[in-house]
Image (tube, grey):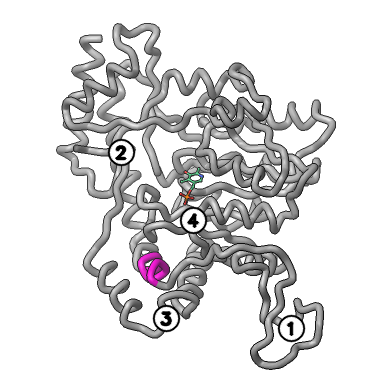
Amino acid sequence: MISYGKQNISQKDIDNVIEVLKSDFLTQGPTIENFERYVANYCGAKYAVAVTNATSALHIACLAAGLKKGDILWTSPNTFVASANCGLYCGADIDFVDIDDNTYNMSIAELEQKLKETKIKPKVVIPVHFAGQSCDMLRLKELAEKYGFMIIEDASHATGADYLKTKIGSCQYSDMTVFSFHPVKIVTTGEGGMVLTNSKELYDKLILFRSHGITRNKDFMKRESDGPWYYEQVDLGFNYRMTDIQAALGISQMARIDEFVAKRRYLANRYNELLKNMPLKLPYQSQNTNSSWHIYVVRADFSKLKITKQELFAKMREKGINLNLHYIPVHTQPYYIKLGFNKGDFPISEKYYEEVFTLPLFYDLTDKQQEYVVKCLGGILKNA
Ligand SMILES: *Cc1c(COP(=O)(O)O)cnc(C)c1O
């Protein structure tokens, strides 16, 4: 079965993990800090905080931003539910900004319009770099300054991507950036996530929220120390710590990131070429961005074809190819409908959902396999 995404683990990756398994620290050891430093240096950010996954990374990023009950968080409906759920964890309300019909990222024109019309402004906006292509961060930053909201980039798809000659994660146009290291993403630690920032103040809060709100740093304590054993809980945090075992895999994978991204770009360019004469809308790439191609999505107008999307998925599956779909618009999930959202609220993302599907794209996909995927898809669409 050819699936839509898959990790690549080298012998060196395995050896690096084994080394930590034989060391003194399985968690809270030096490998975590080395991993954080590695990713921060790679991206050009000052600080990085490794955590259990991108979901917990988004949660502590929202807490560090001061998001709480009575505040509002805005994000894109075309994302994984975690980009919105993180606001609910903090007791805040959620709203969405519809996507751009070409990039499938949050539409900045829609955002600007909504900011003008809405009385209660968002405290935090979470742009999602969909498929690995950066949002229009220059304009987003301008709006953040004008309307006074904070920006947390959900860059779960975009580790290794570039925007205007800077790496995603540099936080040059945002307050914080979040990465995911789930096995389908660009680099993996099994489960894992990270928050990057250039702000010492945010960094100190992220460290606290990662580990129970407990500090051993005198500067943050409310009282005098009782002795060398002393620590204080000064806020309500969580146990969101990554293990050193995972961080070892993370460093090893990060050493290969340029190779990973280069292969994804190669395969995406090849899809662009191989699919160009099919009745499909291929991914549009805007200027200033260089995607890391977490996924390759195409759109078909199924109302003009003699085949439904369900039938297409079934036929491809018969041929050993597992298509996927990114994403069901978050506001149409039953949980969000219960919160008061309705079908029809964000029509561009809903129409997109009707048409879109995701083709296999991962490091080990061979030219032959890719040609097979294209041949199967072409055959099915031709008879449709
Ligand atoms: C994968 C993903 C997440 C969640 O990542 P985890 O590491 O699995 O928690 C959040 N947002 C987006 C856009 C994602 O793709």
Magenta stretch bounds: 245-251
Q: Which mark is residue 53?
A: 4
Please state which of residues 353 and 276 is positioned toward the viewer in this rendering. Answer: 353
Q: Which residue is mark 3?
A: 25
Identity, as a three-letter code, of the amino acid under mark 1 = Lys
The tag earlier along the polypeptide, 3 or 2, is 2
Q: CA distance from mark 4 to mark 1?
A: 29 Å
| Image position of 39 (left or right of 319) | right
Mark 4 vs ligand 1: CB under 8 Å? yes
The answer to if 150 sits in the magenta stretch is: no
The secondary structure that dominates the magenta segment is helix
Q: Which residue is mark 2?
A: 4
Q: Please indicate, yes or no, whether residue 322 appears anywhere in the rendered image.
A: yes
Q: Position of residue 157 (x, y in %)?
A: 46, 46
Identity, as a three-letter code, of the amino acid under mark 3 = Phe
Instruction: Establish if 150 lies above or below 314.
Output: below
Instruction: Establish if 15 lies above or below 256.
Output: below
Q: Which quadrant would residue 348 be assigned to in this image? A: top right
Q: Please tell me whether mark 1 sits on a helix, a strand or a loop.
A: helix
Q: CA distance from mark 1 to mark 2?
A: 49 Å
Q: CA distance from mark 1 to mark 3?
A: 25 Å
Q: CA distance from mark 4 to mark 2?
A: 21 Å
For the residues carrying marks 4 and 2, which lies nearer the camera in this image? Answer: 4
Q: Which residue is mark 1?
A: 218
Q: CA distance from mark 3 to mark 4?
A: 20 Å
